[in-house]
Image (spheres, rainbow, N blue to C red):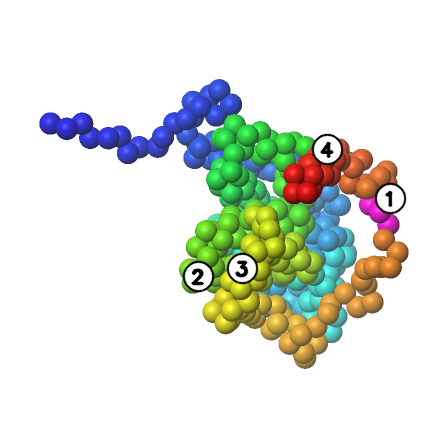
Amino acid sequence: MKNIPDIGPVKKKILGIKISESVIFFIVFVAVFFHIFFTHNRKNLGQWEYPIWADAAAYFVYLPATFIYHYDGSKMPENISAMTGDGFSIENDKIVTKVAMGVAILQAPFYAFSYLIANNFNINDNGFGKVYIYGLGIGAAFYFTLGLFFLYLFLKRRYSKNVCFITLLLIIFGTNLYYYTYEKFLYSHLYSFFIFSTSLYLIDKLIKTNFKKTIYIALFGIILSLAFLVRYTNPIFIVLLLLFLDIDSWQALKQRFKYIFNIKFISITAISFIIILLPQMFYWHYLTGNFLYYSYGNEGFNWLEPKFLEFFFSPNNGAFIYTPLYFIIFIYAIIMSIKRNRMVY
């Protein structure tokens, strides 16, 4: 009788430890959620340390507005804007927030879960209370873990498992990502990371299938739209990935353009993008009467006077000061570019 091969989870040595990959990511998810729980379980609505405060409240307010108050500002709790750091406002009984709803869309399943618990157990905390914080904490742990997972899958096609996991550890402990996961998990940073990691994995799939598989094209349109709704500038990074990932010659770049600029890719991407964008367009119409609206008013970028020194070295959130790992990556990228150019010429 032939031996039947074992089809269970394959355990491989990672950093010298024999353990399955799925177990590692599950442990990460559980550990991150409990860190979030114990970080915020003693904080209360109205305190600046509470997760729903200032910018976080601007991203969050779509959720209670949708599930509980149905965009009727007159039904919102009294002084709720001031109690959450004035991240949004109530004007003419309308709920006004200038940020887009990408974070809220991603967190909607977890808010809905909390909403069901609150209703079933008669928890009356106006949609802003602890039960929702814990639900969104699960969501934050989920997107953090899933972002790491997709990044790992992308890296695994190129490097050994040990290199992949060391890279993930450097990202977790060498950047501000984890801070924006356990402490400021209603800001857009975590969700941008998830979307960028997913984009890397998805674009890699598109490249391997010569941009012909419909499901990958549709998913790309969805991710691109979510990227826009999480932060308006995010699609710039994704489009650059789409154009230049794994490109090593002019011929390869020309072929990439042929794959991208065809009717099938553009039409499926556009349809998927617009479908995800529709809720935001309806909100803009509710707010202004127009389906398209720039919510930031006179705010913008000063392209002609970039503040490079302040961006990299400012003691107030300078990239290299607060995240020294970026400096190492920056120098390494310059060295590798010089070496590559020497090899070409």
**What's the CA distance linking mark 2 and mark 3?**
13 Å
Q: Residue furthest bottom?
A: 289
Residue 53 x, y percent position in the rendering: 72, 50
Which residue is labeled 4 in the image?
Answer: 328
Residue drawn at 85 percent across, 53 percent down: 306
**What's the CA distance linking mark 2 and mark 4?**
38 Å
Q: Dot 1: within a 10 Å radius of its alpha carbon, few (fewer than 14), some, or many (20 or more) residues?
A: few
Residue drawn at 52 percent across, 53 percent down: 203
Whether label 4 touches label 1, CB < 8 Å: no
**What's the CA distance linking mark 4 and mark 1?**
17 Å
- The amino acid type found where label 4 is placed reads Ile
- The amino acid type found where label 3 is placed reads Gln
Q: Is residue 50 left or right of residue 19?
A: right
The residue closer to the viewer here, 24 or 77, is 24
Which residue is labeled 1 in the image?
Answer: 309
**What's the CA distance linking mark 3 and mark 4?**
33 Å
